[in-house]
Image (cartoon, coloured by chain):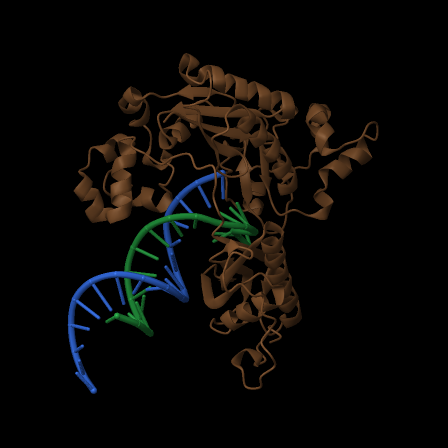
Chain colours: A brown, B green, C blue
Amino acid sequence: MDAFYASCELLRYPQLKGMPVVIGGGRRKEDDLLGKLQAAYPEGEWTEDTFAERLDRIPVDFFPRLNGYTGRGVITTATYAARQFGVGSAMGLMKAAKLCPQAIMLPVDFERYRHFSRTFKSIITDIAPVMQDRGVDEVYIDFTDVPGGQREGGRVLARLIQKSIFEATGLTCSVGVAPNKLIAKMASEFNKPNGISIVHEADLQTLIWPLACRKINGVGPKADEKLKGFGIHTIGDLAAREQHWLIENFGKSYGAWLFDAAWGRDDRPVETESEPVSMSRETTFERDLHAVRDRAELGAVFTRLCEQVAADLQRKGYEGKTIGIKLRYDNFQAVTRDQSLSDYTADAKRIRQVAGQCLKRVDLSRRLRLLGVRVGSLVKAGAAPDSVNHPMKAEEPGHEWQTQLLFTDD
DNA sequence: TCTGGGGTCCTGGGACTT
DNA sequence: TCTGAAGTCCCAGGACCC
């Protein structure tokens, strides 16, 4: 298989090139960028469709600065200019504001990302239909059977994709071309932004082995730390280890996978279809809440999360039979509880009832910073033989779920 | 004052069944 | 009736990804 990995650099403002910019924080009403632009520049209409053509006309001074930011939230991504100040993904915004107060701060705006994401992906599938969705701004493409796909080792097709995306959205796109998904992903990082990198099987030792193990998609901070503890810093170091040694130290599955990854082996196909396994909603509170003292507020949030998950399930046509909750305490410790049902549901009341049961199994005497609700073991709505949206069980006295408990109303 | 939200996958322990 | 082994399912936690 020949694979492309294309990642789209979402929302690049030409006038911010070379400037420290961070994207992060939660979506708030006052972050309505289009509304602000319309107010500041009333000539012409600011819509998602005109945005791409007009974005380079927005003056730099229009964008808010990180200086003086207060509140919770982390950086989703940062430009290289911002990273030079020590600012990076997953860093708290308040800490970032101290390190680089002059950075421009753009709010996370998933609605707009989804809009551009759909355009980005539909352009690609028009050109190369075998595409795997890898998130909002990334895809894998199998171009083995695309006419002309092999010209100049894939470069011609990659250029066509980049040009088509830029013309439609004003966005740039990095492309990696390689014999498999694993290497294509690494290749796409070589030449960012808007680059094309082609890596052949024979390039493994010269291009891949010198890279840090952390560059492998699937080696995170924990595994990297452990590898370093063994003196394994580069992918080449990893490849030099025996497979059985890696299995002994990293487990049967992960050890074997590490070995294959180091040798550039990856036979995963480009999957064009996938079914979701779970859907969830969670929220971090502006301040830590207490189950008793903030009962009303927590109860309202809990109900809203259940309703949101139910709405997501119904809108997308799924039902689930494993219902769970997630809490994060003020010390950042996370706990989860879930419960499987004998039938499938997408009903908000039912989800809330079962999630309420799960809440009874955790310590609610400690302050909470996050609450989440999850529905798993999904099937297409109506596909399960015993799929019934039970109303909440009849009010049978003595049922445990009826016990008044802290912020649940059950 | 640190540390979002929405996912997938893996592991290990315990309960249950055969 | 008891016991142990093996397989399976459920549950909780953690690593990782975008």
A153 over A141 or under it: above or below: above
Q: Position of residue A311 (x, y in %)?
A: 63, 56
The answer to which quarter of the image holds residue A120 is: top right
A140 or A81, nearer to the observer: A140
Toward the top, the furthest residue is A152
Whether residue C17 is situated above or below residue A195 in the rendered picture: below
Q: Residue at x 77, y 38 (%)?
A: A35
Left or right: A310 in relation to A44: left
Give the farthest residue toward the right: A43
Rendering coords of residue A207 (x, y %):
32, 23
Tell me if I can see residue A97 in this picture. yes
Q: Residue at x 71, y 30 (%)?
A: A49
**Residue B13 in the image, given as x and y percentages of width and height:** 29, 66
Q: Quadrant of the N terminus of chain A?
A: top left
- Where, by quadrant of the figure, is residue B12 drawn? bottom left
Q: Is residue A155 above or below residue A403?
A: above
Q: Is residue A202 left or right of residue A366?
A: left
* Residue ranking furthest to the front: A385
At 55% across and 29% down in the image, what residue appears?
A9
At x 65%, y 41%, the residue is A111
- Exactly how many numbered labels are in the figure? 0
As rendered, which of A142 and A57 lies closer to the eye?
A142
The location of residue A178, given as percent across then percent down, is 37, 24
